[in-house]
Amino acid sequence: MNKEDLKQQLDHALVLQDISLEDDAQDRLIDYLELLVRWNKTYNLTAIRDPEEMISRHLIDSLTILPFLNGKRFIDVGTGAGLPGMVAAIAAPDTNWVLLDSNQKKTRFLTQVVIELGLKNVDVVHARIEAFNDGRRFDMATSRAVTSLLALKEQVKHLCPNLLAMKGKIPDDELKELPESCEVVIHQVRVAHDTAERSIIMIKDKNQ
């Protein structure tokens, strides 16, 4: 599938999902997707190989967090291939992101994306979340199905009290593990052409 076909597929998916993006953001998302496809052949960044499938399951899926982002400075924990952080940073250039992962091949890929796309609002960090602290607080931490909600909350508490976790089916068992000090809001979301259940769990620690 050539670049123009990918752009048409993305544009169609955005319309179905009722998401509006600037043309420049759409172009950069396609550039990111092409880099992901190319690097994935060598580095196995994602199990999904088909670019058209990546549009729905990676790009559109990541974009579902946009209405729930509060603030300007975010950290994407265990970002992997940049999901959702890189996608959100491209879509919302007025926000600032730290993309953090302990896997060096993934952070190397993300660094190349930042260079080739000329992104000014993204910093890539190769580190474990427990060991990272740049001395500044984040408005929110994001994560896409990295670990349990309780473990994730504990890992990011030194950085910010607000967590947005992308999950599949609502994780009832994980929610029960959270302390009473946590204020939890659950949003169920759908991605066009994908029947898989998705949920966005927003957690605020009232004690922080």
Image: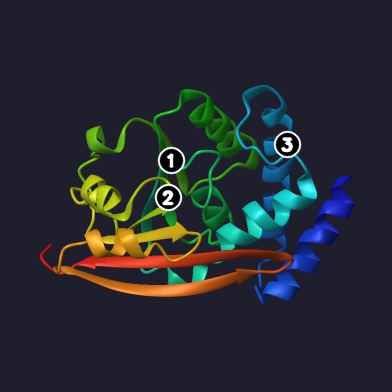
Nearest the viewer among 35 and 50 is 50
Amino acid type at mark 1: Asp
Image depth: mark 2 or mark 3 in front: 3
Q: Where 91 falls versus 45 (above or below)?
A: below
Figure quadrant of residue 34:
top right
Looking at the rendered structure, the kind of residue marked 3 is: Val
Residue beneath disc 1: 123
> Quadrant location of the N terminus?
top right
Going from N to C along the chain, the mark reached first, 1 or 3, is 3
Closer-to-camera residue (112/146): 146
Q: Position of residue 111 (x, y in %)?
A: 53, 32
The residue beneath circle 2 is 97
Callout 3 crowding tier (Cα within 10 Å): few <14, some 14–19, many ≥20: some
- Quarter of the figure with the C terminus: bottom left
Residue 65 seen anywhere in this rendered image of the structure: no
Q: Bin the neighbour count of mark 2 within 10 Å (Cα to Cα): few under 14, some 14-19, many 20 and up.
A: many
Asked if labels 2 and 1 touch by Cβ distance under 8 angstroms, the answer is yes
Q: Position of residue 76 (x, y in %)?
A: 41, 48
